[in-house]
């Protein structure tokens, strides 16, 4: 048995075409007393999925933060709850690029249990300086997003 940690699996999730898929499980700590995932905890699932998606496609958000150059901040967030998740259920957070902006991006995300949609989210991220002012995204990041957008336009097999 190989006990060596694999940072690429499963924590980062995986790409399925232009979509990033991030598996999560609903733990007791995520639920209210009735065993249903508390609504605010979906935000944690969505944030983790977005962070791992950026890491997987080559956007080093952490290095920007560590250098004091700022970070993405949630500028706008819309959620629609369709069905609850319950303790111990295996869930999948699916993220896909919406719109690319000079100083940010729009990301569409879903939390699913199998084929059942539980939560749909549209998240607008703004890249801001350490002082909280909007700043243009690095050209390399925009190129990565444009590549993802091009993948999303291609028909899936």
Image (tube, grey):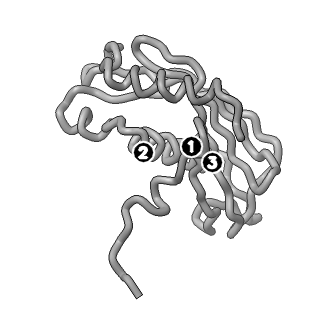
**x and y percent of residue 50 in the render?**
50, 40
Determine the secondary structure under disc 1.
strand
- Above or below — where is 110 with respect to 90? above
Left or right, residue 81 beside residue 20: right
The outermost residue toward the bottom is: 1
Q: CA distance from mark 2 to mark 1?
A: 9 Å
Q: CA distance from mark 3 to mark 2?
A: 15 Å
- Above or below — where is 136 with respect to 154? above
Identify the disc placed on residue 56. Answer: 2
Counting residues from the start of the chain, the first of labels 3 and 2 encountered is 2
Given contact means CB atoms under 8 Å apart, are the residues at marks 2 and 1 in contact?
yes
Left or right, residue 131 beside residue 119: left
Q: Residue at x 71, y 41 (%)?
A: 157
Counting residues from the start of the chain, the first of labels 2 and 1 encountered is 1
Q: Which residue is mark 3?
A: 93
Determine the secondary structure under disc 3.
strand
Given contact means CB atoms under 8 Å apart, are the residues at marks 3 and 2 in contact?
no
Select label 3 or label 1 by which is in front. Answer: 1
Q: CA distance from mark 3 to mark 1?
A: 8 Å
Q: Residue at x 58, y 65 (%)?
A: 29
How many callouts does the rendering have?
A: 3
Q: Residues within 10 Å of mark 1 (few under 14, many from 20)?
A: many
Counting residues from the start of the chain, the first of labels 3 and 1 encountered is 1
- Above or below — where is 146 with respect to 82? above
Determine the secondary structure under disc 2.
helix
**x and y percent of residue 155 in the render?**
70, 31
Select label 3 or label 2 by which is in front. Answer: 2
Q: Quadrant of residue 25?
A: bottom right
Q: Which residue is mark 1?
A: 20
Left or right, residue 48 beside residue 85: left
């Amino acid at each position: 048995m190989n006990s060596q940690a694999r940072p690429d699996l499963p924590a980062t999730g995986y790409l399925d075409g232009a979509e990033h898929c991030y598996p999560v499980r609903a733990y007791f700590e995520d639920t209210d007393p009735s065993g249903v995932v508390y609504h605010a905890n979906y935000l944690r699932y969505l944030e983790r999925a977005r962070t791992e998606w950026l890491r997987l496609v080559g956007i080093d958000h952490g290095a920007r933060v560590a250098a004091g150059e700022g970070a993405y901040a949630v500028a706008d967030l819309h959620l629609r709850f369709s069905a609850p998740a319950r303790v111990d259920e295996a869930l999948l957070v699916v993220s896909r690029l919406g719109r690319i902006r000079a100083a940010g991006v729009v990301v569409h995300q879903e939390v699913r249990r199998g084929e059942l949609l539980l939560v749909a989210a549209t998240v607008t991220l703004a890249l801001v300086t350490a002082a909280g002012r909007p700043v243009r995204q690095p050209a390399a990041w925009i190129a990565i997003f444009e590549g993802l957008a091009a993948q999303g336009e291609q028909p899936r097999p």
